[in-house]
Amino acid sequence: MTPVRYRIPLPALAAASLVLVSLALALVFFVAPNDVNQGFSQRIFYFHVSIAFTAYACFAVGAWKALRYLWKGDPRSDLESYVAVHQGVIFGTAVLLTGSIWAKISWGHWWLWGEDELVLFLVLFLFYCAYFMLRFSVDPGPQRANFSAVYALFGVVLIPVSFLAIRIAKSFVHPQVFTLHGPNFGGWILATYCVAQAALLVFAYTLYRVELAGKRLDLRLRELRLA
Amino acid sequence: MTYFGDVGALARKDLLLELRARDTLPAMLLFVVATFVVFHFSLPSHSSQLAASGLLWVAIIFTALLGLGRAFVPEREQRVLDGLVLAPCDRSAIWLAKAIATLAFLVAAEVVALPVFALFFHGLSGATVAGVVLADVGICAVGTFLGAMAVATRARDLLLPLLFLPLAIPIVVGGVGASVAAAPSRYLGFLALYDVLFGVLCWATFEYVVAEAQ
């Protein structure tokens, strides 16, 4: 039997994410001021940046669980790592979409190779799509868990390396929102961003828990069928 | 035997095999030269030297992929890997030896390919050659590692390019930068950083790739 660990119950999490996402939507559309240069379209920033950060967080959790798997050999960590990477790819797709829309409105093109964050996400997207190819061409078992874990670890090294590569290679047109001197905005914009960020993180965690519960149920069912 | 003794013996085995069977190297050579000819015709005439420099890196990556795809095939077909895993040597030695052997093939292919490139397109700068050498180390370190994984999957040859190309993008960025930039030193530094980071990561985690290989 698995050791009992205290976890927030899933319905409470779902309710919390519903409240936070609604609050974030209300703040984004009714409270946050219009951007001086970009006008209404700039409001996609609250989603784009929060989703991007959430995707990175998912990949980081995936790598952390992968490390735990290699360390402790617990098959549950393998499943958790997979689910986190899966959520990361879903949020990564959303980053590519929102980024493209924003680029089209702000700069007139759907895709700009000069935009570091988009290119980085494309590289990561390709990388993590290959993760699924790898995972699903190995039979379930310790070998698949090992391969997935090692590949997920490659991901966290690839993120900073690609970022550096793209930074040194390309001109710089992406708006730099966070600098070394802290975020260069304040007041309602910062508050809205923080709420949107919290909402998406809680939402991602809820999705992660739902998928994990489903996958565990599936595994348990298979075991019972075989028994 | 010491760690490096193991590595030396394993690398020697691969080089001897290649010397006797001549499976991989002639294929890589022919491929890279054919690729240059294809590139010549795919570039519009009077296109810039910059475009040709970029194509050199495409040719190198794909030639390396050709060699890397073959790297662990003998181990799998003849079930050598089972023996190696049972042998009382550190498992990372298997990776290091294979990476060194693949590096030797790639460098041998490039010893021919780079002069051919200089002949067909335009001359080579010292920075390009330095970039190629640094990139080769990274390509072979990461590629050998992924090759060992890919050959153990159902998809086999299909999977290696999918796993390898996203990880090779930083190498291409650094390599092309070293070839075309006015100040190539920071691109070379970046390639060296890539080699060190991924070299250490592969060395530390290879054990898990060959554990319970069957």
Image: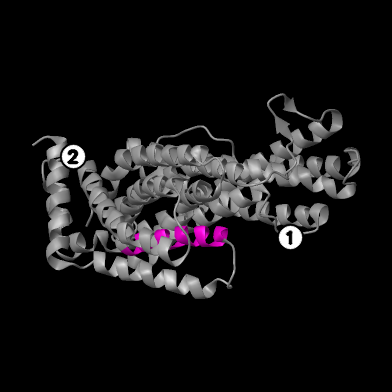
**Residue B121 placement, left or right of A75:** right
- Residue at position x 36%, y 45% in the image: A75
Q: Is residue B93 above or below residue A223?
A: above
* Circle 1 residue: A110
Q: Nearer the viewer, residue A114 or B88?
A: A114
Q: Is residue A120 above or below residue A192?
A: below
Q: Measured from the top left, where is residue A207 in percent x and y?
A: 60, 48
Residue type at tag 2: Asp
- Residue at position x 25%, y 68% in the image: B26
Q: Residues within 10 Å of mark 2 (few under 14, many from 20)?
A: some
Q: Is residue B58 magenta?
A: yes
Q: Is residue A149 above or below residue B68?
A: above
Predominant secondary structure, magenta span: helix
Q: Are marks 1 and 2 in contact (CB under 8 Å)?
A: no
* Mark closer to the observer (1, 2): 1
Chain to which the residue tagged by mark 2 belongs? B
* Circle 2 residue: B90
Q: Measured from the top left, where is residue B194 in percent x and y?
A: 43, 41
Magenta part of the chain: B49-66
- Residue at position x 31%, y 53% in the image: B144
